[in-house]
Amino acid sequence: MGGCDTVELARQFGTPLYVFDEGTLRGKAQAYTQAFASRYPNVLLCYAAKAFINPWLAKLLAEEGLGLDVVSAGEMTVARRAAFPMSKVHFHGNNKLADEMALALDLQVGRVVIDNFGEIPLLESLAQTRRTVAEVLLRIAPGVEAHTHDYLRTGGLYSKFGIPVMTDQAAEAVARIAACKHLRLVGFHSHIGSQIFDLLPFEENVATLLEFGLQMQERHQFDLLEISPGGGWGIQYLDSDDPPDIADVAGVITATVRSIAARSRMPLPKLVLEPGRSIVGQAGITLYTAGAIKDIPGVRKYVSVDGGMADNIRPALYQARYQAVVANKADSEASETVAIAGRYCESGDVLIDAARLPHIEPGDVVAVPATGAYCIPMASNYNMSLHPAIVAVKDGQPTLIRRRQTYDDLLACEIF
Protein backbone atom coordinates (compact mmCIF):
# COMPACT_ATOMS: atom_id res chain seq x y z
CA MET A 1 0.00 0.00 0.00
CA GLY A 2 1.57 3.29 -1.11
CA GLY A 3 4.68 1.25 -1.91
CA CYS A 4 4.87 -0.08 1.67
CA ASP A 5 4.62 -3.66 2.94
CA THR A 6 1.70 -3.71 5.37
CA VAL A 7 3.19 -6.60 7.34
CA GLU A 8 6.32 -4.51 7.90
CA LEU A 9 4.16 -1.51 8.87
CA ALA A 10 2.46 -3.67 11.50
CA ARG A 11 5.83 -4.75 12.84
CA GLN A 12 7.26 -1.23 12.88
CA PHE A 13 4.30 0.69 14.30
CA GLY A 14 2.31 -2.02 16.11
CA THR A 15 -1.37 -2.87 15.79
CA PRO A 16 -4.14 -1.87 15.62
CA LEU A 17 -2.82 0.51 13.00
CA TYR A 18 -4.67 2.78 10.58
CA VAL A 19 -2.88 3.38 7.28
CA PHE A 20 -3.79 6.07 4.72
CA ASP A 21 -2.50 6.10 1.16
CA GLU A 22 -1.71 9.69 0.18
CA GLY A 23 -1.89 8.89 -3.55
CA THR A 24 -5.44 7.59 -3.24
CA LEU A 25 -6.53 10.66 -1.26
CA ARG A 26 -5.09 13.10 -3.76
CA GLY A 27 -6.42 11.06 -6.67
CA LYS A 28 -9.97 11.14 -5.29
CA ALA A 29 -9.79 14.89 -4.61
CA GLN A 30 -8.52 15.55 -8.12
CA ALA A 31 -11.14 13.29 -9.68
CA TYR A 32 -13.91 15.26 -7.96
CA THR A 33 -12.39 18.58 -8.95
CA GLN A 34 -12.06 17.55 -12.59
CA ALA A 35 -15.52 15.92 -12.80
CA PHE A 36 -17.36 19.00 -11.54
CA ALA A 37 -15.11 21.75 -12.95
CA SER A 38 -15.43 20.30 -16.45
CA ARG A 39 -19.23 20.45 -16.21
CA TYR A 40 -19.98 23.56 -14.17
CA PRO A 41 -18.41 27.03 -13.91
CA ASN A 42 -18.56 27.72 -10.16
CA VAL A 43 -18.06 24.83 -7.73
CA LEU A 44 -16.70 24.52 -4.20
CA LEU A 45 -15.96 21.00 -2.99
CA CYS A 46 -16.07 21.02 0.81
CA TYR A 47 -14.63 17.83 2.28
CA ALA A 48 -16.85 16.56 5.13
CA ALA A 49 -14.47 16.59 8.10
CA LYS A 50 -16.70 14.29 10.16
CA ALA A 51 -15.51 11.37 8.02
CA PHE A 52 -11.97 11.92 9.39
CA ILE A 53 -9.82 14.97 9.90
CA ASN A 54 -6.46 15.76 11.43
CA PRO A 55 -3.83 18.43 10.67
CA TRP A 56 -2.01 16.29 8.10
CA LEU A 57 -5.19 15.66 6.13
CA ALA A 58 -6.36 19.28 6.44
CA LYS A 59 -3.11 20.48 4.88
CA LEU A 60 -3.40 17.94 2.07
CA LEU A 61 -6.96 19.02 1.29
CA ALA A 62 -5.95 22.67 1.24
CA GLU A 63 -3.16 21.85 -1.22
CA GLU A 64 -5.76 20.22 -3.47
CA GLY A 65 -7.93 23.34 -3.36
CA LEU A 66 -10.85 21.84 -1.43
CA GLY A 67 -13.02 23.52 1.18
CA LEU A 68 -14.04 22.01 4.51
CA ASP A 69 -17.42 21.14 6.05
CA VAL A 70 -17.09 21.22 9.86
CA VAL A 71 -19.62 20.50 12.61
CA SER A 72 -17.82 21.47 15.81
CA ALA A 73 -15.36 23.88 17.40
CA GLY A 74 -12.88 21.00 17.49
CA GLU A 75 -12.98 20.54 13.73
CA MET A 76 -12.70 24.31 13.28
CA THR A 77 -9.67 24.34 15.55
CA VAL A 78 -7.97 21.62 13.51
CA ALA A 79 -8.55 23.71 10.39
CA ARG A 80 -7.21 26.88 12.01
CA ARG A 81 -4.08 25.23 13.39
CA ALA A 82 -3.42 23.60 10.02
CA ALA A 83 -3.62 27.07 8.40
CA PHE A 84 -6.62 25.97 6.33
CA PRO A 85 -8.25 28.91 4.46
CA MET A 86 -11.19 29.69 6.76
CA SER A 87 -13.11 31.41 3.94
CA LYS A 88 -13.60 27.92 2.50
CA VAL A 89 -14.98 26.49 5.75
CA HIS A 90 -18.72 25.87 6.17
CA PHE A 91 -20.02 25.38 9.72
CA HIS A 92 -22.86 22.84 10.07
CA GLY A 93 -24.66 21.16 12.96
CA ASN A 94 -28.15 20.70 14.38
CA ASN A 95 -27.33 22.17 17.81
CA LYS A 96 -24.47 24.63 17.46
CA LEU A 97 -23.39 26.00 20.82
CA ALA A 98 -23.10 29.73 21.38
CA ASP A 99 -19.33 29.59 21.88
CA GLU A 100 -18.98 27.56 18.68
CA MET A 101 -20.95 30.13 16.70
CA ALA A 102 -18.86 32.89 18.23
CA LEU A 103 -15.68 31.07 17.24
CA ALA A 104 -16.99 30.64 13.69
CA LEU A 105 -17.56 34.38 13.43
CA ASP A 106 -14.21 35.22 15.01
CA LEU A 107 -12.41 32.88 12.60
CA GLN A 108 -14.41 34.36 9.70
CA VAL A 109 -15.62 31.05 8.31
CA GLY A 110 -17.12 31.29 4.85
CA ARG A 111 -20.64 30.14 5.74
CA VAL A 112 -22.69 29.29 8.79
CA VAL A 113 -25.42 26.82 7.87
CA ILE A 114 -28.51 27.58 9.96
CA ASP A 115 -30.23 24.36 10.97
CA ASN A 116 -33.14 25.48 13.19
CA PHE A 117 -35.15 28.47 14.36
CA GLY A 118 -33.17 28.95 17.58
CA GLU A 119 -29.96 29.61 15.71
CA ILE A 120 -31.37 32.64 13.88
CA PRO A 121 -31.63 35.11 16.83
CA LEU A 122 -28.50 33.68 18.44
CA LEU A 123 -26.35 34.18 15.37
CA GLU A 124 -27.92 37.59 14.74
CA SER A 125 -26.99 38.70 18.26
CA LEU A 126 -23.43 37.38 18.01
CA ALA A 127 -22.91 39.03 14.62
CA GLN A 128 -24.36 42.32 15.88
CA THR A 129 -21.96 42.30 18.83
CA ARG A 130 -19.08 41.86 16.41
CA ARG A 131 -20.43 44.51 14.03
CA THR A 132 -20.38 42.09 11.14
CA VAL A 133 -22.80 40.50 8.71
CA ALA A 134 -22.69 36.70 8.62
CA GLU A 135 -23.35 35.05 5.28
CA VAL A 136 -25.56 32.04 5.88
CA LEU A 137 -27.18 29.09 4.18
CA LEU A 138 -30.43 27.64 5.49
CA ARG A 139 -30.56 23.88 5.82
CA ILE A 140 -33.87 22.47 4.69
CA ALA A 141 -35.27 18.97 5.00
CA PRO A 142 -36.39 18.32 1.43
CA GLY A 143 -38.51 15.24 2.05
CA VAL A 144 -36.33 13.10 -0.24
CA GLU A 145 -35.93 9.54 1.03
CA ALA A 146 -32.59 7.90 0.29
CA HIS A 147 -32.24 4.13 0.02
CA THR A 148 -29.76 3.49 2.82
CA HIS A 149 -29.67 2.45 6.48
CA ASP A 150 -32.18 4.32 8.69
CA TYR A 151 -29.35 5.82 10.74
CA LEU A 152 -27.83 7.28 7.55
CA ARG A 153 -30.96 9.03 6.27
CA THR A 154 -31.02 12.77 6.92
CA GLY A 155 -33.41 14.37 4.44
CA GLY A 156 -36.87 13.18 5.48
CA LEU A 157 -39.64 14.85 7.46
CA TYR A 158 -38.67 13.00 10.64
CA SER A 159 -34.97 13.85 10.46
CA LYS A 160 -33.42 15.83 13.31
CA PHE A 161 -31.55 17.88 10.68
CA GLY A 162 -32.86 20.92 8.83
CA ILE A 163 -36.21 22.70 8.66
CA PRO A 164 -38.91 20.89 6.64
CA VAL A 165 -40.17 22.42 3.42
CA MET A 166 -43.28 20.26 3.62
CA THR A 167 -44.74 22.13 6.63
CA ASP A 168 -44.07 25.74 5.53
CA GLN A 169 -41.61 26.03 8.43
CA ALA A 170 -38.67 26.49 6.04
CA ALA A 171 -40.49 29.43 4.41
CA GLU A 172 -41.02 30.95 7.87
CA ALA A 173 -37.31 30.54 8.64
CA VAL A 174 -36.45 32.42 5.45
CA ALA A 175 -38.72 35.27 6.51
CA ARG A 176 -37.07 35.47 9.91
CA ILE A 177 -33.57 35.52 8.41
CA ALA A 178 -34.62 38.18 5.91
CA ALA A 179 -35.69 40.40 8.82
CA CYS A 180 -32.22 40.22 10.43
CA LYS A 181 -29.81 43.08 9.83
CA HIS A 182 -26.67 41.06 10.55
CA LEU A 183 -27.47 37.89 8.59
CA ARG A 184 -27.33 37.62 4.81
CA LEU A 185 -29.05 34.62 3.27
CA VAL A 186 -27.13 33.52 0.18
CA GLY A 187 -28.65 30.11 -0.46
CA PHE A 188 -29.88 26.77 0.76
CA HIS A 189 -28.39 23.48 1.90
CA SER A 190 -29.72 19.96 2.28
CA HIS A 191 -28.24 16.52 2.77
CA ILE A 192 -30.30 13.38 2.23
CA GLY A 193 -28.00 10.74 3.76
CA SER A 194 -24.87 8.74 3.10
CA GLN A 195 -23.64 5.52 1.49
CA ILE A 196 -26.23 5.98 -1.28
CA PHE A 197 -25.81 4.22 -4.65
CA ASP A 198 -28.96 5.43 -6.44
CA LEU A 199 -28.54 8.76 -8.27
CA LEU A 200 -32.25 9.58 -8.53
CA PRO A 201 -32.54 10.91 -4.92
CA PHE A 202 -29.68 13.34 -5.63
CA GLU A 203 -31.51 14.63 -8.69
CA GLU A 204 -34.70 15.07 -6.63
CA ASN A 205 -32.77 16.81 -3.85
CA VAL A 206 -31.19 19.34 -6.22
CA ALA A 207 -34.56 20.04 -7.83
CA THR A 208 -36.22 20.62 -4.45
CA LEU A 209 -33.43 22.96 -3.34
CA LEU A 210 -33.59 25.07 -6.47
CA GLU A 211 -37.36 25.23 -6.73
CA PHE A 212 -37.70 26.21 -3.06
CA GLY A 213 -34.90 28.73 -3.47
CA LEU A 214 -36.55 30.33 -6.48
CA GLN A 215 -39.84 30.65 -4.62
CA MET A 216 -38.14 32.29 -1.64
CA GLN A 217 -36.07 34.58 -3.86
CA GLU A 218 -39.22 35.92 -5.51
CA ARG A 219 -41.03 36.30 -2.18
CA HIS A 220 -38.22 38.02 -0.26
CA GLN A 221 -36.24 39.76 -3.01
CA PHE A 222 -32.80 38.36 -2.26
CA ASP A 223 -30.22 36.90 -4.62
CA LEU A 224 -30.05 33.10 -4.70
CA LEU A 225 -26.29 32.84 -5.03
CA GLU A 226 -25.60 29.23 -4.11
CA ILE A 227 -27.08 25.85 -3.36
CA SER A 228 -25.49 23.00 -1.45
CA PRO A 229 -26.99 19.54 -2.07
CA GLY A 230 -24.50 17.95 0.33
CA GLY A 231 -22.79 14.66 -0.40
CA GLY A 232 -23.49 11.07 0.56
CA TRP A 233 -22.72 8.94 -2.51
CA GLY A 234 -21.46 5.53 -1.52
CA ILE A 235 -18.20 3.63 -1.86
CA GLN A 236 -17.32 0.00 -2.37
CA TYR A 237 -16.86 -1.96 0.85
CA LEU A 238 -17.65 -5.39 -0.59
CA ASP A 239 -17.00 -7.04 -3.94
CA SER A 240 -20.76 -6.97 -4.53
CA ASP A 241 -21.08 -3.19 -4.02
CA ASP A 242 -21.60 -1.12 -7.16
CA PRO A 243 -21.32 2.58 -6.25
CA PRO A 244 -21.84 5.36 -8.80
CA ASP A 245 -18.85 6.76 -10.64
CA ILE A 246 -17.78 10.30 -9.70
CA ALA A 247 -18.36 11.45 -13.28
CA ASP A 248 -21.92 10.09 -13.19
CA VAL A 249 -22.63 11.90 -9.90
CA ALA A 250 -21.27 15.15 -11.32
CA GLY A 251 -23.23 14.69 -14.53
CA VAL A 252 -26.60 14.19 -12.81
CA ILE A 253 -26.20 17.04 -10.34
CA THR A 254 -24.87 19.65 -12.76
CA ALA A 255 -27.35 18.73 -15.51
CA THR A 256 -30.25 19.12 -13.07
CA VAL A 257 -29.05 22.56 -11.95
CA ARG A 258 -28.48 23.71 -15.53
CA SER A 259 -31.89 22.50 -16.69
CA ILE A 260 -33.85 24.21 -13.91
CA ALA A 261 -31.78 27.39 -14.15
CA ALA A 262 -32.35 27.59 -17.91
CA ARG A 263 -36.07 26.97 -17.54
CA SER A 264 -36.31 29.65 -14.84
CA ARG A 265 -34.02 32.08 -16.67
CA MET A 266 -31.83 32.53 -13.62
CA PRO A 267 -28.03 32.84 -13.41
CA LEU A 268 -26.29 29.60 -12.48
CA PRO A 269 -25.81 29.57 -8.69
CA LYS A 270 -22.58 28.51 -7.05
CA LEU A 271 -22.65 24.78 -6.39
CA VAL A 272 -21.28 23.47 -3.08
CA LEU A 273 -20.71 19.73 -2.69
CA GLU A 274 -19.61 17.88 0.44
CA PRO A 275 -17.93 14.54 -0.31
CA GLY A 276 -16.36 12.89 2.73
CA ARG A 277 -16.47 9.10 2.79
CA SER A 278 -16.04 8.94 -0.99
CA ILE A 279 -12.69 10.75 -0.73
CA VAL A 280 -11.22 9.19 2.38
CA GLY A 281 -12.99 5.83 2.83
CA GLN A 282 -11.02 3.65 0.43
CA ALA A 283 -7.76 5.48 1.15
CA GLY A 284 -7.58 3.86 4.59
CA ILE A 285 -7.07 0.35 5.88
CA THR A 286 -6.77 -1.12 9.38
CA LEU A 287 -4.15 -3.65 10.38
CA TYR A 288 -4.82 -6.00 13.30
CA THR A 289 -2.93 -8.91 14.81
CA ALA A 290 -4.82 -12.19 15.22
CA GLY A 291 -4.90 -13.57 18.76
CA ALA A 292 -7.24 -16.04 20.45
CA ILE A 293 -9.09 -18.52 18.24
CA LYS A 294 -12.32 -20.20 19.33
CA ASP A 295 -13.60 -22.98 17.07
CA ILE A 296 -17.13 -24.25 17.79
CA PRO A 297 -17.40 -27.35 15.55
CA GLY A 298 -20.24 -27.10 13.10
CA VAL A 299 -21.27 -23.69 14.41
CA ARG A 300 -18.69 -20.91 14.09
CA LYS A 301 -15.00 -20.17 14.27
CA TYR A 302 -13.99 -16.91 15.95
CA VAL A 303 -10.67 -15.23 15.26
CA SER A 304 -10.16 -12.43 17.77
CA VAL A 305 -7.99 -9.48 16.86
CA ASP A 306 -6.35 -6.80 19.01
CA GLY A 307 -8.89 -4.10 18.08
CA GLY A 308 -12.59 -3.99 17.38
CA MET A 309 -15.49 -1.76 18.31
CA ALA A 310 -13.31 0.73 20.20
CA ASP A 311 -11.58 1.68 16.93
CA ASN A 312 -14.38 0.70 14.50
CA ILE A 313 -17.89 0.80 15.95
CA ARG A 314 -19.61 0.87 12.56
CA PRO A 315 -20.46 -2.87 12.38
CA ALA A 316 -21.97 -2.78 15.88
CA LEU A 317 -23.70 0.57 15.38
CA TYR A 318 -25.40 0.10 12.02
CA GLN A 319 -24.36 -3.31 10.68
CA ALA A 320 -21.64 -1.99 8.38
CA ARG A 321 -20.03 -4.78 6.38
CA TYR A 322 -16.37 -5.28 5.48
CA GLN A 323 -14.09 -7.82 3.87
CA ALA A 324 -10.63 -8.81 5.09
CA VAL A 325 -7.26 -10.04 3.90
CA VAL A 326 -4.61 -11.98 5.81
CA ALA A 327 -1.76 -9.68 4.85
CA ASN A 328 1.08 -12.15 5.46
CA LYS A 329 -0.82 -14.85 3.53
CA ALA A 330 -2.28 -12.70 0.77
CA ASP A 331 -1.24 -15.18 -1.94
CA SER A 332 -2.75 -18.20 -0.16
CA GLU A 333 -6.07 -19.74 -1.15
CA ALA A 334 -9.08 -19.13 1.07
CA SER A 335 -9.79 -22.31 3.00
CA GLU A 336 -12.16 -21.43 5.86
CA THR A 337 -14.94 -19.09 6.90
CA VAL A 338 -14.36 -17.27 10.16
CA ALA A 339 -15.85 -14.45 12.20
CA ILE A 340 -13.39 -11.63 12.89
CA ALA A 341 -14.14 -10.67 16.49
CA GLY A 342 -12.96 -7.71 18.49
CA ARG A 343 -11.37 -7.93 21.92
CA TYR A 344 -13.88 -5.85 23.85
CA CYS A 345 -16.47 -7.02 26.37
CA GLU A 346 -19.54 -6.89 24.15
CA SER A 347 -21.13 -9.78 22.29
CA GLY A 348 -21.80 -7.38 19.44
CA ASP A 349 -18.10 -6.64 19.01
CA VAL A 350 -17.73 -8.56 15.74
CA LEU A 351 -16.08 -6.73 12.84
CA ILE A 352 -16.94 -9.30 10.14
CA ASP A 353 -19.55 -12.05 10.57
CA ALA A 354 -18.27 -14.35 7.85
CA ALA A 355 -14.90 -13.81 6.19
CA ARG A 356 -13.61 -16.34 3.70
CA LEU A 357 -9.85 -16.46 4.37
CA PRO A 358 -6.76 -18.67 4.37
CA HIS A 359 -6.12 -20.63 7.56
CA ILE A 360 -5.40 -18.07 10.29
CA GLU A 361 -3.04 -18.54 13.21
CA PRO A 362 -2.25 -16.28 16.18
CA GLY A 363 0.20 -13.59 15.08
CA ASP A 364 -1.11 -13.27 11.53
CA VAL A 365 -1.80 -9.72 10.29
CA VAL A 366 -5.45 -9.17 9.38
CA ALA A 367 -6.03 -6.21 7.07
CA VAL A 368 -9.50 -4.65 6.73
CA PRO A 369 -9.77 -2.33 3.69
CA ALA A 370 -11.99 0.75 3.26
CA THR A 371 -11.83 1.86 6.89
CA GLY A 372 -10.74 5.44 6.18
CA ALA A 373 -14.14 7.00 6.92
CA TYR A 374 -15.92 7.31 10.28
CA CYS A 375 -13.89 4.68 12.14
CA ILE A 376 -11.32 6.95 13.78
CA PRO A 377 -13.74 9.85 14.48
CA MET A 378 -16.13 7.49 16.30
CA ALA A 379 -13.38 5.64 18.18
CA SER A 380 -13.62 5.38 21.96
CA ASN A 381 -11.61 4.34 24.97
CA TYR A 382 -14.05 1.55 25.78
CA ASN A 383 -12.56 -0.85 28.34
CA MET A 384 -9.94 1.90 28.86
CA SER A 385 -8.28 0.87 25.62
CA LEU A 386 -5.86 3.11 23.74
CA HIS A 387 -6.54 4.88 20.45
CA PRO A 388 -4.45 3.38 17.61
CA ALA A 389 -1.62 5.06 15.74
CA ILE A 390 -2.17 6.43 12.23
CA VAL A 391 0.39 6.27 9.42
CA ALA A 392 0.36 7.90 5.99
CA VAL A 393 2.21 6.15 3.15
CA LYS A 394 3.61 7.52 -0.08
CA ASP A 395 6.26 6.25 -2.51
CA GLY A 396 7.37 3.52 -0.13
CA GLN A 397 7.79 5.86 2.84
CA PRO A 398 5.59 5.72 5.96
CA THR A 399 4.97 8.86 8.01
CA LEU A 400 3.47 8.74 11.50
CA ILE A 401 0.66 11.32 11.53
CA ARG A 402 -0.82 10.40 14.93
CA ARG A 403 1.09 8.53 17.60
CA ARG A 404 -0.49 5.72 19.56
CA GLN A 405 -2.23 6.94 22.69
CA THR A 406 -0.47 6.15 25.99
CA TYR A 407 -1.88 5.37 29.41
CA ASP A 408 -0.68 8.78 30.56
CA ASP A 409 -2.77 10.31 27.76
CA LEU A 410 -5.71 8.18 28.85
CA LEU A 411 -5.57 9.48 32.41
CA ALA A 412 -4.50 13.06 31.63
CA CYS A 413 -7.93 14.53 32.38
CA GLU A 414 -8.60 12.47 35.52
CA ILE A 415 -8.35 14.13 38.94
CA PHE A 416 -6.76 11.92 41.58
Image (cartoon, helix red, strand yellow):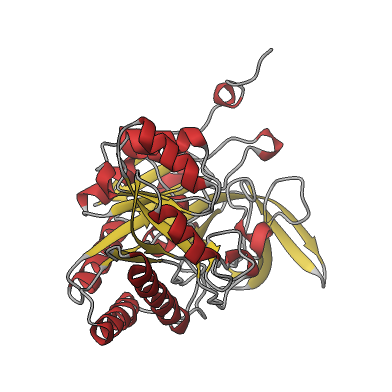
* Quadrant where the C terminus is found in the figure: top right
Nearest to the observer: residue 378 or residue 15 = 378
Measuring 24% from the left and 73% from the top, which residue is drawn there?
35
Measuring 28% from the left and 78% from the top, which residue is drawn there?
254
Count of number-bearing discs? 0
Can residue 7 be seen from the camera position used here? no
Q: Position of residue 85 (x, y in %)?
A: 24, 43
> In this image, 96 relative to 274: left or right?
right
Q: Position of residue 221 (x, y in %)?
A: 31, 65
- Does residue 27 lie above or below 78 as drawn? below
Nearest to the observer: residue 259 or residue 19 = 259
Q: Position of residue 279 (x, y in %)?
A: 36, 61
Nearest to the observer: residue 366 or residue 149 = 149
> In this image, 343 relative to 255: left or right?
right
- Does residue 380 lie above or below 327 as drawn? above
Q: Residue furthest top?
A: 416
Q: Position of residue 266 (x, y in %)?
A: 23, 77
Nearest to the observer: residue 175 or residue 74 = 175
The quadrant holding residue 43 is bottom left
Can residue 42 be seen from the camera position used here? yes
> In this image, 247 relative to 291: left or right?
left
* Quadrant where the N terminus is found in the figure: bottom left
Measuring 30% from the left and 37% from the top, which residue is drawn there?
132
